[in-house]
Structure formats: structure tokens, C-alpha cells
Image (cartoon, grey):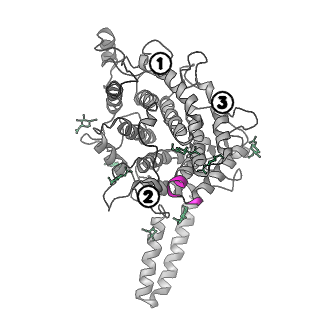
């Protein structure tokens, strides 16, 4: 499905097939429908071709979105059992880890933000929870990678400005370094909540609590009414009080699902109240009559960029996780997903293949839009109706086999120190050298932090 406008044009003249007709009471009908949409998603993947980079989707899709798209494919396998793409999925997740196994590959570090890194981290967290085929022993394991992403993010907690929180960007030279955004902090919150439930190491839950409290204190989530909007973020120059009032589906979903993992882990009703309050406001993302989902901040004006076109998919995935971890929410959320799926199926009727999915699901047909985000969103909205057909996310105590290490992510610095200690045990006379090396290490770390 490489589109040129000519192909699209011909596709309109000679439709090869009509909308995907999916009967949600029939497993084979569901699976064949989802297979077409998943194939459509993978048509944007070219990382397995000569000269291309494993893990990356074709231009113009950013690295972060590839991380998110692989989670869609992971869940696709989990709910349908179709393992056609599992090798590509596994290769991709392992190829992009970076030398330090923390999803900061050197090709990305000049532009990588906390949220970019986190979307890969969330995907490997899901791989651990779904007991996805473990890497070889000498390779990094899914849990390890998720912990490394969490630990490196937590280490960036910035108490110097706005009394805490993560900046959007990791590096000073990038636009947005002075912006503290909801998505980056929401990702830390979610990873903390999921790691707490998975490992039962309470330190992760403390981080999740701390992140939640900060986001609410800064009013990025406004908790003053019964329905809580989740806003976009604020700038350091204004002590983060200049809250940007954009509301994106995926931010709302991120906090609902994170709160649902906390609810599942703690069984504290305050977390259920928080989910319910965000969900109430989240209804602005649905047409009031049809209950069909849309991206309210950009869709009506036709302004959704490539990133934003994928948000409904990520949101749908988080809705599914919310249902799984807080079953009290299941009935109503699934009702909205069911209503939405009617629109999705009508929309997946475009392009030269006759089942390309569009952006606007309110229409009776395809809206002429297509892309990785559109395919992801359609796939996720549909497959998250199947959440109860497979076991809920596993944890270490319920049979997950992925292994990790609470110190993951700090290996670079630790390794340097360890090498120096080796020298020490071999040759005490080398103590002076060690001191020198440690000073150099300290200075270079300090230099790194300043730069
Ligand atoms: C790359 O993977 C796709 C599946 O998405 C497959 O159809 C294609 O043949 C593969 N290409 C190569 C060069 O292996
Ligand atoms: C980094 O980019 C180079 C050049 O395009 C490519 O050969 C390499 O595979 C990439 N590595 C990763 C991890 O993306
Ligand atoms: C709203 O958040 C603030 C700051 O965390 C907290 O003090 C207050 O109790 C919260 N209100 C509700 C209704 O949850
Ligand atoms: C969770 O809380 C509910 C109500 O507070 C209680 O009925 C239930 O037994 C608790 N479950 C666990 C696993 O603690
Ligand atoms: C936690 O999740 C499991 C699996 O879906 C569910 O059975 C259980 O009821 C959940 N716990 C709470 C407190 O909702
Ligand atoms: C997880 O995967 C391992 C290795 O493939 C397998 O032995 C184990 O039975 C699986 N556990 C569950 C709960 O699926
Ligand atoms: C975990 O990582 C730390 C630091 O790299 C290392 O010292 C430790 O041996 C590791 N623990 C296990 C159980 O592998
Ligand atoms: C628990 O998690 C924290 C935070 O990552 C880590 O520092 C600590 O080593 C972990 N504890 C265990 C017992 O794994």
C-alpha cells in the first residue's frame, strides 16, 4: 500500500473490495478482518528491506511512533494468535535498544524526548506482561528494558523547576527542553504503576504516586470538578502554571490505565475514583449521539499531524488496559468501544486495496486519509474489544517469565566504576589512579549534566 495520488485515484475508480465486514460474534470473522488491518499497518514497515533500519517504519513516521506501533502488533498477536509478524516484532524491539539497553540508541539521541523513549519502554513492558517470546540469554530481556527506561527517566526528575516533574526533552539543545509535558510524566507514572504490579517492588509505586501528585498539583489534571480534564503541560519559565489547555485522547488514556494498574496493585478506592473522574471527562472524545470516538483537539479542524493521527489507537489500547485492571470500568468503556467500532469498520473501506482505514470514523465511508496512525487506531479500537478473550496481563507472581534487574539502565556508570574497583583489588598501589579516574568520571558526568 505505497500510495501515490495516482494509485489512490485509481483505487477510488476501481474499488477492489468493500468495507471490512466483521462479525463480533465470530472468531474467524474477527481474525480475518483484523488480519487485513494489521497487514495494512505493516505495509508502512520497510525496516526489513535492504539498506533500511530494523524497527523503523517508512518516512515520515518518527521513531517514537514505531515504538507505539510495535505495541499494536504485539497485542494483535496476543488477541488473534497470528504470529506472522512476531519475528519482525522481536527483531525490531531488540535492534532499537541502544548500546546501553535503555532505548536511547545513538541514532535517536539528538532528538529523543522522554516520551519517545517511554513508548518503547511501554511496549516491552507489555511484552513482559504478555509473556512474549523471551530474547536469548545474552540479549536484554523485556522486563530489564522496561526497568532501564523507567530508571533513566526517574533519574531525570527535575526538582529545580516547578517543584518536580520531567521535562519533555532529554537534551538541552532540543526545542521543548523548557516544557514539562503531561505525556512524559504520564509515561513515568504508567511505567511505575506497571512495574509495581509486575514486580511487587513498592519503590515503583512510590514513584507513580509522586508523579501523579505532581501532575495534579500543577493542574495538568484538573481535579476540581467531577470530570477531570487532562491537559498538555506547562513551561518552566512560568513555574509550569501556564497550563496548555489542549486535551488529547492518549493523555487521558495514559492516566486512566496507569491509575488502573495502581488500583489493581493497591486495591485502594482512591485510584478507582481517579479513573472514573478522568473517564467522565474523556467522553468529550465521543460524538454524543453515536458514541463514536474522535480526536477532538484536531480532527474537526482537519489539523491532525502524523503523530496525532495515532493517538486514538494508543488511547484505545489504554482503555483496554483500564478495563482489565479495573473491571468496574469495563461495561461502560466497552459500550463506547463497541459503538466506535461501527464507525471504524465503515471507515476501513478506502485506498487501492479497498480496506484502508481513514481518520474520521463518523462518516459513512472512507475520508480519503491514510497512514500508519490511521491503521494503528483502527486496529486498536477493534482489538481492544477482545481483551477478555485472553488472560489479563501477567505479573511475576502469575507466571510471567521475563527477567530484569532493579539497577537496569545504570550499567554504563556502574561498569566504569566496577572496572576501576577491579584495578584496585589487583593492585593497591593503583589507588591513586582510581581516585584520578573517579574524579574524571565525576567531572565528565557533571559536564554531561551541564551540557
Ligand atoms: C518484510 O516484511 C514483510 C511483512 O510485513 C514481508 O511481506 C516482506 O516480504 C519482507 N521483506 C523482506 C525483504 O524480507
Ligand atoms: C543507525 O543508522 C545507521 C545509518 O543509517 C544504520 O546503519 C544503523 O542500523 C542505525 N542503527 C540503529 C540502532 O538505528
Ligand atoms: C486535587 O488535588 C490536590 C493536589 O494534589 C489535592 O490536594 C486535592 O485533595 C485533590 N482534590 C480531589 C477532589 O481529589
Ligand atoms: C479489595 O477491596 C474490596 C473492597 O474494599 C474488598 O472487598 C476486596 O476483598 C479487596 N481485595 C483484595 C485482593 O484485597
Ligand atoms: C485486577 O485485575 C484482575 C484481572 O483482570 C481482576 O480480576 C481483579 O478484579 C482486579 N482487581 C481489582 C481491585 O479491580
Ligand atoms: C511463558 O513462556 C514460557 C516460555 O515460553 C513458558 O514456558 C510458560 O509456560 C509461559 N507462561 C505463561 C503463563 O504463559
Ligand atoms: C543487576 O545489575 C547490577 C548492576 O549492573 C549488577 O551489579 C547485579 O549483579 C545485577 N543483578 C543480577 C541479579 O543480575
Ligand atoms: C526496587 O526498585 C528500585 C527502583 O528502581 C531499585 O532501586 C531497587 O533495587 C529495587 N529493589 C529490588 C529488591 O529489586
- Residue 368 in view, yes or no: no
What residue is pinned by disc 1? Answer: 343
User: Which tag, 1 or 3, sits closer to the chain's start?
Assistant: 3
Dominant secondary structure (helix, strand or loop) of the stretch shown in magenta = helix
Q: Residues within 10 Å of mark 1 (few under 14, many from 20)?
A: many
In the figure, residue 424 lies in which quadrant?
A: bottom left
User: Which tag, 1 or 2, sits closer to the chain's start?
Assistant: 2
Q: Is residue 48 left or right of residue 394?
A: left
Furthest-top residue in view? 13
Please state which of the two labelled residues, at mark 3 or mark 2, is closer to the viewer. 3
Q: Does residue 96 lie above or below 281 as drawn?
A: below
What residue is pinned by disc 3? Answer: 280
Cα distance in 3D space between marks 1 and 2: 39 Å
Q: Residues within 10 Å of mark 3 (few under 14, many from 20)?
A: few
Cα distance in 3D space between marks 1 and 3: 22 Å
- Residue 89 in view, yes or no: yes
What residue is pinned by disc 2? Answer: 144
- Nearest the camera: 21 or 91? 21
Please identify the quadrant where the C terminus is shown: bottom right
- Nearest the camera: 56 or 345? 345
Secondary structure at badge 2 equals helix
Residue shown at 27%/38% (left/top)? 84
Amino acid at each position: 500500500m505505497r500510495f501515490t495520488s495516482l494509485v489512490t485515484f485509481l483505487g477510488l475508480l476501481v474499488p477492489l473490495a468493500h468495507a471490512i465486514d466483521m462479525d463480533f460474534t465470530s472468531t474467524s470473522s474477527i481474525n480475518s478482518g483484523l488480519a487485513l488491518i494489521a497487514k495494512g499497518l505493516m505495509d508502512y514497515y520497510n525496516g526489513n528491506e535492504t539498506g533500511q533500519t530494523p524497527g523503523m517504519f517508512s518516512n515520515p513516521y518518527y521513531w517514537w511512533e514505531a515504538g507505539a506501533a510495535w505495541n499494536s502488533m504485539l497485542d494483535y498477536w496476543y488477541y488473534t494468535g497470528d504470529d506472522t509478524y512476531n519475528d519482525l516484532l522481536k527483531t525490531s524491539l531488540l535492534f532499537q535498544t541502544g548500546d546501553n539497553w535503555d532505548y536511547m540508541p545513538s541514532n535517536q539521541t539528538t532528538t529523543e524526548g522522554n516520551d519517545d523513549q517511554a513508548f518503547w519502554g511501554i511496549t516491552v513492558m507489555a511484552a513482559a506482561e504478555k509473556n512474549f517470546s523471551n530474547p536469548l540469554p545474552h540479549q536484554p530481556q523485556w522486563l530489564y528494558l522496561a526497568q532501564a527506561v523507567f530508571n533513566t527517566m526517574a533519574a531525570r526528575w527535575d526538582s529545580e523547576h516547578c517543584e518536580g516533574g520531567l521535562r519533555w526533552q532529554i537534551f538541552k539543545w532540543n526545542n521543548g527542553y523548557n516544557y514539562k509535558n503531561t505525556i512524559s510524566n504520564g509515561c513515568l507514572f504508567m511505567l511505575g504503576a506497571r512495574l509495581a504490579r509486575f514486580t511487587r517492588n513498592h519503590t515503583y509505586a512510590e514513584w507513580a504516586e509522586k508523579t501523579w501528585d505532581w501532575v495534579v498539583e500543577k493542574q495538568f489534571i484538573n481535579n476540581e470538578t467531577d470530570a477531570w480534564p487532562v491537559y498538555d503541560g506547562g513551561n518552566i519559565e512560568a513555574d509550569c502554571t501556564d497550563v496548555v489547555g489542549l486535551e488529547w485522547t492518549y493523555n487521558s488514556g495514559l492516566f486512566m490505565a496507569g491509575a488502573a494498574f495502581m488500583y489493581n496493585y493497591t486495591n485502594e478506592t482512591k485510584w478507582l475514583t481517579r479513573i472514573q473522574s478522568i473517564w467522565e471527562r474523556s467522553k468529550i472524545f465521543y460524538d454524543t449521539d453515536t458514541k463514536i470516538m474522535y480526536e477532538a483537539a484536531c480532527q474537526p479542524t482537519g489539523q491532525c499531524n502524523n503523530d496525532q493521527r495515532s493517538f486514538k489507537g494508543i488511547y484505545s489500547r489504554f482503555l483496554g488496559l483500564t478495563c482489565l485492571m479495573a473491571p468496574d470500568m469495563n461495561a461502560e468503556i466497552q459500550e463506547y468501544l463497541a459503538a466506535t467500532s461501527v464507525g471504524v469498520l465503515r471507515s476501513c473501506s478506502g485506498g487501492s486495496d479497498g480496506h484502508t482505514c481513514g481518520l474520521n470514523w463518523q462518516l459513512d465511508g472512507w475520508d480519503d486519509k491514510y497512514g500508519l496512525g490511521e491503521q494503528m487506531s483502527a486496529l486498536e479500537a477493534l482489538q481492544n474489544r477482545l481483551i477478555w478473550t485472553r488472560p489479563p496481563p501477567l505479573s511475576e507472581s502469575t507466571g510471567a517469565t521475563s527477567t530484569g534487574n532493579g539497577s537496569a539502565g545504570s550499567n554504563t556508570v556502574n561498569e566504569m566504576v566496577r572496572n576501576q574497583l577491579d584495578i584496585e583489588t589487583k593492585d593497591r598501589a593503583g589507588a591513586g589512579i582510581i581516585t584520578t579516574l573517579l574524579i574524571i568520571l565525576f567531572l565528565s558526568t557533571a559536564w554531561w549534566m551541564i551540557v
